Image (tube, helix red, strand yellow):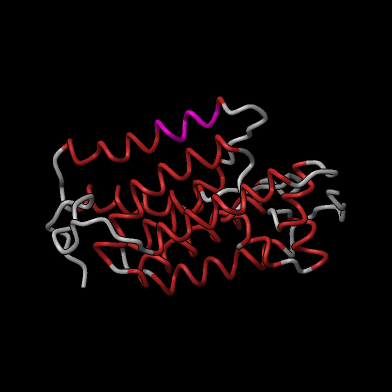
Amino acid sequence: MLNYDDDFFNSRQKKEFRINATIIISMMQITIQAVIMVINGISHFCILYYAGSKHTPAIKYHYHLHRLFNPIFLHGGNGHLLSNLLSQLLLCYSYENRNGTQDFLQLYFLAGIGGNIVSALYFPIATGVGASGAIFGFMGYLLTYLIKTKQPQEKYYGILIVLCIQILLIFEPHSHVDYSAHFGGFLVGILWYQKQKALIGVLLLLGCVCIFMIDVPDQKYC
């Protein structure tokens, strides 16, 4: 049962710092990035490809469905990782403390997968990595909560901070921001607040079907 009367960013139940799934996922992302950085003899983009970056031809022709999940743990560079970690800790940590680990994990991965599905459809040739889709799921949830409950303007500061962090990513060298993944995750977050879990499942399934129907050549990235 969710309590919408309290501040989203404050948990009266748990005020002390604790290791939760948000922290564990963040540590996994840091570890994976550190391992990728020390690998030599192959280009950085090929490492990400072999690690499971989003790539529509590989999904359609070779049934690499893990490429809709793995990108959540992969990042294009240290700046990309840092911006997502800051946004993730700001939004997800408080959400998990408030609504529980199970609810957090469901929204996190559904939004992340939803973002990657939209990206696979909108940018079928390009590869993609990052947890931004998952993070924007919580932004969609939070913005819907603030509007529906008519919260005062100062409660919107958290969203503005996250947006500023994400905008800084534009200045990361060789970075190409995938706004389609942001949109996909954001939409999942809105529907999650509305408790439309069945609709989310249907949309994700339809998105996967559409990936196998779009016209894209079978080309190997590396």
Work out whether residue 165 or residue 207 is closer to the camera in this orientation and state it.
165
| Residue at image coords 13%, 56% | 6
Q: Say whether residue 202 is left or right of residue 208.
A: left
Figure check: 1 above or below 175: below
| Residue at image coords 67%, 68% | 209
Instruction: Point out residue 220 in the picture as x, y percentages from the top left corner.
Output: 86, 52
Q: Which residues are magenta?
A: 164-170
The quadrant in which residue 77 appears is top right
Instruction: Point out residue 20 in the picture as x, y percentages from the top left corner.
Output: 36, 63
Q: Say whether residue 5 is left or right of residue 56.
A: left
Q: Say whether residue 214 is left or right of residue 202.
A: right
Majority secondary structure of magenta residues: helix
Instruction: Point out residue 15 in the picture as x, y percentages from the top left corner.
Output: 18, 56
Figure check: 104 above or below 177: below
| Residue at image coords 69%, 53% | 53
| Residue at image coords 44%, 54% | 187
Figure check: 166 above or below 17: above
Query: Which quadrant is the N terminus positioned in?
Result: bottom left
Instruction: Point out residue 79 in the picture as x, y percentages from the top left corner.
Output: 55, 34
Work out whether residue 4 or residue 168 is closer to the camera in this orientation and state it.
168
